[in-house]
Image: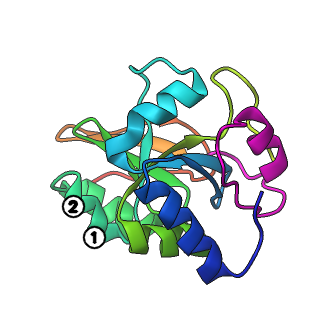
Amino acid sequence: MSTGGPAELVEMAATELRAGRAVIIPTDTVYGLAALPENVDLLFELKQRPPDKAVAILVARPADAEQMFDPLPLTRRLMEEFWPGALTIVQDGCGVRCPNHPLVHALASEVGPIATTSANLSGQPTPHTAAEAAASFPTVQLAIDGGLLQAPASTVVEVTEEGLSVLRQGAVVVDGFVE
């Protein structure tokens, strides 16, 4: 588990990610198990998670979501209203979130989009501390301590040409948010 200055932690995490390894990072909601998108299979292997369950892509800025898909007008409105924040937007099968956390922002600015999922083994409770998350993944060499995290998970919505559906209710309420 690592603590230190923000720039040092970002550099340590960026080095691990670029080397094809996973890291445990704090977000604005829960601890995340993260890897670069080209190494997303590592997340499924570590979590013992079925590969048909999607992971979110964290970005530093809303504009970075355009690397994954061409945002629909409703998607753009959701980004403007709720990002950075605890809203994961799924469009064209890709879930993207711009967390309101300075470390994630700095790390995604450094390495680009980051694939992430909650830092727990599949089916197990979500850990509230970096130590708990690290205990679940002993082969992960870097777990950044962001303190006690007990916020609700992000809300997950899917946006299509037909509109908006809530896939998981979490920290953000989007009821009544329509085109």
- In terms of image quadrants, where is residue 18? bottom left
Taking the spot 57% from the left edge, 30% from the top edge, the residue there is 46
From this view, report whether residue 39 is shown above or below residue 148. Answer: above
How is the model colour-coded? rainbow
Residue 116, numbered circle: none
Is residue 133 on the magenta stretch? yes
Most foreground residue, 17 or 57: 17
Mark 1, secondary structure of its residue:
helix
**Spot occupied by residue 158 in the image (x, y as percentages of width and height):** 35, 39
Residue at the (64%, 43%) spot, across then down: 140
Whether the residues at callouts 2 and 1 have beta carbons within 8 Å, the answer is yes
Quadrant assignment for the N terminus? bottom right
Which residue corresponds to mark 2?
A: 66
Mark 1, Cα crowd under 10 Å, few <14 / some 14-19 / many 20+, is few
Question: Along the horizontal axis of the image, is 172 left or right of 144?
Answer: left
Residue, x 80% and y 38% (percent of image)? 135
Instruction: Tell me, yes or no, if residue 70 can be seen here.
Output: yes
The residue type indicated by label 1 comes to Ala
Q: Quickly name the residue at label 1.
A: 63
Which residue is pictured at 75% across the width and 63% down the height? 2
Q: What quarter of the picture does the C terminus occupy?
A: bottom left
Q: Secondary structure at mark 2?
A: helix
Is the residue 106 above or below the residue 44 in the image? Answer: below
Depth order, front residue of 116/139: 139
Q: Does the image show residue 176?
A: no
Residue density around tag 2, few if under 14, some if 14–19, many if 20 or more, within 10 Å:
few
Horizontal and vertical percent position of residue 148:
84, 57
Range shown magenta: 130-153
Q: CA distance from mark 2 to mark 1?
A: 6 Å
Q: Is residue 9 above or below residue 94?
A: below
